[in-house]
Amino acid sequence: MATVKTAGTGRAFRPVECTEIAVTVKRTEKTCAEAVAKTDGRVAELSRLLEEKGFGEKALQTTDFGVTAEYENEHRGGEYARKFVGFSCRESLKLCFPFTAERLSAAVAALCGDGAEEQFHVAFTAEHGEAVKNEALEKAFADALSKAQALARASGKKLGKLLTVTDGGQDGGLYSAMPAVLSARTVSVAPEDVGIFASVSAEWELE
């Protein structure tokens, strides 16, 4: 039985709909209790600043929390020894909201205020991720089918029954990194559309 096997690719895109900001608050103190208290205090302050900018009272959500002992190398008599520095408390948080340049500017202003020490990362995403993935897969299969039909015509045959179809996976994710210049006063940003790349392979009988 003669067969034809082809591979197809497809892409599906959506405009940015949501903003996600990941924030890390870290404080190091001599005691564990002091480190936790300082970290909690800063998180509470950030929550208050965001609420003043029009975000909800519980807009800032904790995604991870941990306390570790910190050491540094100290040179003693020609050798290095570990010296205890203190305890570091680290809390990871996330802020999500519908994307507009104005809302992003307000969030950045709250996070980048005077005395801010926090690291944060901004990403953009779209909703309905499964629908985008399915669209990319449908386009990939259509591409594989078109190639198979062309090969069948070139060989003087017709495309018969579909024997196998395999999902080659998706790539890209529905996230776009932050192409922006940040300051406490303004954000210049133009997020690109987010999308998914999919591939499939399929095999048909030739008649």
Image (spheres, helix red, strand yellow):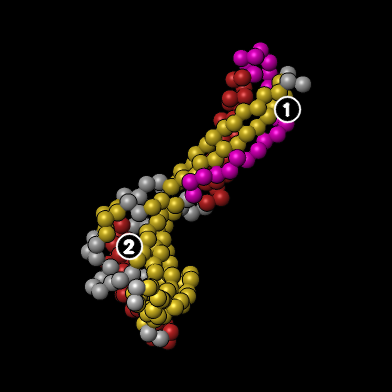
Query: Circle 2 is placed at which residue position?
Result: 103
Report the Cα–Cα distance between label 1 and label 2.
53 Å
Magenta residues, as a range?
A: 152-173
In this rendering, is residue 3 above or below 47? above
Q: Is residue 160 left or right of residue 90?
A: right
Residue 116 at x, y = what percent?
A: 28, 72
* Residue 158 magenta: yes
Q: Which residue lies furthest to the front in this view?
A: 78
Q: Which residue is drawn at 61% across and 14% down?
A: 154
Q: Residue at x 24, y 62 (%)?
A: 183
The mark found on residue 161 in the picture is: 1
Residue 9 at x, y = what percent?
A: 54, 35
Helix, strand or loop under label 2? helix
Q: Residue furthest top?
A: 156
Going by the numbered disc 2, the residue's amino acid type is: Arg
Residue 122 at x, y = what percent?
A: 37, 59
Q: Which residue is drawn at 40% across and 76% down?
A: 81
* Residue 164 magenta: yes
Q: In which quarter of the image is residue 105?
A: bottom left
Can the viewer see residue 95?
no
